[in-house]
Image: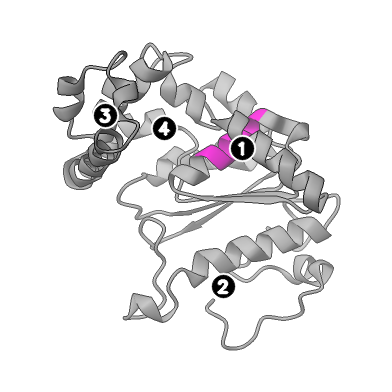
């Protein structure tokens, strides 16, 4: 819920001032981007980062999401059922949800329809005002949703791999991001879902690629005011995934070390 995020951000701002950034990965990225879109100029953030996250969840319901539903959704849905039905809060579901219908689900969309919608009072996942519309920074991917995305006033970084097997790249709405004004979309040809291994052994650098990019973006956004998607020398990152000199100089971090992950 974006209201929960807003409460946490407000509390952090009281303690740290205008130095709060929000970084979310996968589902966390969906929430982060949605918060930035809904809060607009009142986000209390210096930057927002959404990694491997959809900006329009209904797109995943289209044929482009068939492969993910076939290969990845069954094990993911099983884990969701274990979490919700096997945890201490399971009795809270009994009055609003049909447990047999939840147990019969094998895709995330079916799980959301059987549990999330009835529990939270949504009519469906794929209607105006439905769960996926409400949870997405760009709503249903229509004019109304584009206006919501354009309401983003926080410098927002969207990082996504085109080969993401769980969240199709199309759900990032590249053209809408370009027109939004404060959204920077960096798309890589490969990287999977919240992965981006940098060697034959993924443990060598672990998640250094996405973490480094997010931290560079936050530093650049904090130091570059007013923030501009294009500093005059091109978008924030270059073709080698390095933050451009104007943003790095403003952040006072100095040049990247030769041994940097990127």
SS category of the residue bearing label 4: helix
Mark 1 and mark 3 residues within 8 Å of each other at the beta carbon? no
Which stretch is magenta?
Answer: 31-38
- In space, the residues marked 1 and 3 are separated at their CA atoms by 24 Å
Q: Residue at x 47, y 23 (%)?
A: 133
Q: CA distance from mark 2 to mark 1?
A: 33 Å
Alpha carbon of mark 3 to alpha carbon of mark 4: how far? 14 Å
Q: Looking at the image, which is closer to me, 19 or 197?
A: 19
Disc 3 packing (10 Å; few <14; some 14–19; many ≥20): many
Check if mark 2's residue and mark 1's residue have beta carbons within 8 Å: no
- Point out residue 57 in the picture as x, y percentages from the top left corner: 41, 32
Q: Which residue is tagged 1?
A: 5
Measure the alpha-carbon separation of dots 4 and 1: 19 Å
What label sits on residue 57 in the rendered view?
4
Considering only vertical position in the picture, is 81 above or below 239?
above
- Mark sitting earlier along the chain (4/1): 1
Q: Position of residue 244 (x, y in %)?
A: 71, 68
Is residue 21 inside the magenta stretch? no
Left or right of 158 on screen, residue 170: left
Q: Is residue 12 above or below residue 110?
A: below
Q: Quadrant of residue 86?
A: top left
Residue at mark 2: 240
Between discs 3 and 4, the one toward the N terminus: 4
């Amino acid at each position: 819920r974006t209201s929960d995020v807003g409460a946490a951000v407000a509390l952090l701002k009281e303690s740290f001032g205008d130095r709060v950034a929000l970084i979310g990965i996968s589902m966390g990225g969906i929430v982060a981007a949605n918060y930035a879109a809904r809060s607009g100029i009142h986000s209390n953030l210096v930057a927002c980062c959404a990694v491997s996250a959809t900006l329009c969840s209904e797109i995943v319901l289209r044929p482009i999401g068939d492969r993910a539903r076939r290969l990845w959704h069954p094990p993911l849905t099983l884990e969701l059922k274990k979490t919700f039905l096997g945890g201490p809060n399971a009795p809270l579901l009994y009055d609003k949800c049909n447990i047999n219908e939840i147990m019969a689900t094998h895709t995330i969309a079916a799980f959301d329809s059987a549990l999330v919608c009835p529990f939270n009072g949504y009519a469906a996942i794929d209607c105006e005002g439905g769960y996926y519309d409400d949870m997405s920074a760009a709503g249903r991917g229509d004019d109304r949703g584009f206006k919501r995305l354009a309401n983003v006033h926080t410098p927002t970084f969207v990082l996504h791999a085109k080969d993401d097997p769980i969240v199709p790249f199309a759900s990032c709405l590249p053209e809408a991001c370009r027109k939004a004004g404060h959204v920077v979309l960096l798309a890589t040809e490969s990287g999977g879902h919240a992965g981006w291994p940098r060697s034959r052994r993924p443990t060598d650098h672990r998640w250094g690629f996405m973490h480094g990019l997010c931290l560079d973006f936050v530093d650049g956004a904090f130091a570059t005011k007013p923030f501009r998607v294009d500093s005059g020398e091109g978008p924030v990152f270059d073709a080698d995934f390095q933050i451009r000199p104007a943003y790095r100089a403003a952040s006072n971090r100095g040049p990247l070390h030769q041994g940097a992950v990127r």
